[in-house]
Image: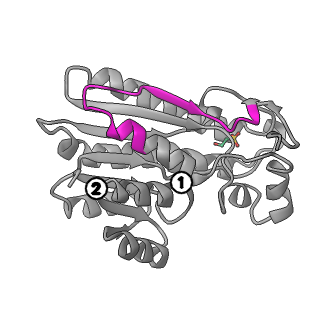
Amino acid sequence: MAGTAVVTGASSGIGAATARRLAAAGHDVVVMARREERLTRLAEEIGGRALPLDVTDAAAVEQAVAALDRCDVLVNNAGGALGADPVGLADADHWQWMFSVNVLGTLRVTQALLPLLRKDDGGTIVNITSTAAFVNYEGGAGYSAAKHAEHALTETLRLELCGEPVRVVEIAPGMVATEEFAVNRFQGDAAKAASVYADVDRPLTAEDVAECVALAVGLPQHVNVDQLVVRPLAQAAQHRIHRGPLFRG
Ligand code: 8X3
């Protein structure tokens, strides 16, 4: 057994793929997310445990974590984007939600699990941020601000834990086509969501990112992947996306 891994935002997308991948690597996986039915189904599938909760609910996080007696790996994946309006038109409620789930959710779960992660043989925290944690783009200010903040939290935590055997890893994906990210961002507008990935030859999948998590987690405990920026080959930079066939033959 490779130890206990807690994955947040595990009911779909990168979180669910990461839970599956870490279970396959031998971890006892504890999955957290709001949607109980999906979560329970996933836990059954991977032989893990489901803790249904909202990471923005401090009391719920405390209560759920009290049920755990071990945590070797924490993957803070819960997050998301809401809206893509320019700053002049942005909805402050959207910004509040994004800050709450991406930043405060990560803070709360990390604080709650840190005592368990500070084990003599070491623990690992993996925060799934985004390339939006480093680069801004039109219409992305609220999401970028939240991801920049999550990046700041991650980097600061690594500095503060220096001298302890706890790794702090940041994985920053670029364009990942998942069932929900863009649809949620555009509040159910499937056509708008699909246009994000239009003609992109193989955007990243949730499984690609899960593979990166497994790679960072699976390295020896003295190896800390500070920051892993991962994009599809068709995306050379935030604004430089090739739309059209990529591979010949
Ligand atoms: C998602 C990447 O480019 O949509 O985290 O902001 S982007």
**Residue stretch rendered in magenta on the structure:** 214-235
- Quarter holding residue 90: top right
Its colouring scheme is one colour
> Label 2 crowding class (10 Å Cα cut-off): few <14, some 14-19, many 20+?
many
Q: Residue at x 32, y 34 (%)?
A: 219
- Quarter holding residue 161: top left
Residue 164 can be seen, yes or no: yes
Callout 2 amino acid: His
Q: Residue at x 35, y 49 (%)?
A: 109
Horizontal and vertical percent position of residue 105: 44, 49
Q: Residue at x 45, y 45 (%)?
A: 104
Q: How far apart in space, not on screen, are marks 1 and 2 (Cα)?
A: 17 Å
The quarter of the rendering in which ligand 1 is drawn is top right
Q: Is residue 192 left or right of residue 149?
A: right
Residue 100 can be seen, yes or no: no
- The label number, if any, that marks residue 27 in the structure image: 2
Horizontal and vertical percent position of residue 218: 33, 40
Horizontal and vertical percent position of residue 47: 31, 71
Callout 1 amino acid: Ile
Q: Which residue is most to the front? A: 249
Q: Quadrant of the N terminus?
A: bottom left
Name the residue tied to disc 1: 14
Check the image and report above or below for 9 versus 211: below
Q: Which residue is most to the left? A: 120
Q: Is residue 148 magenta?
A: no
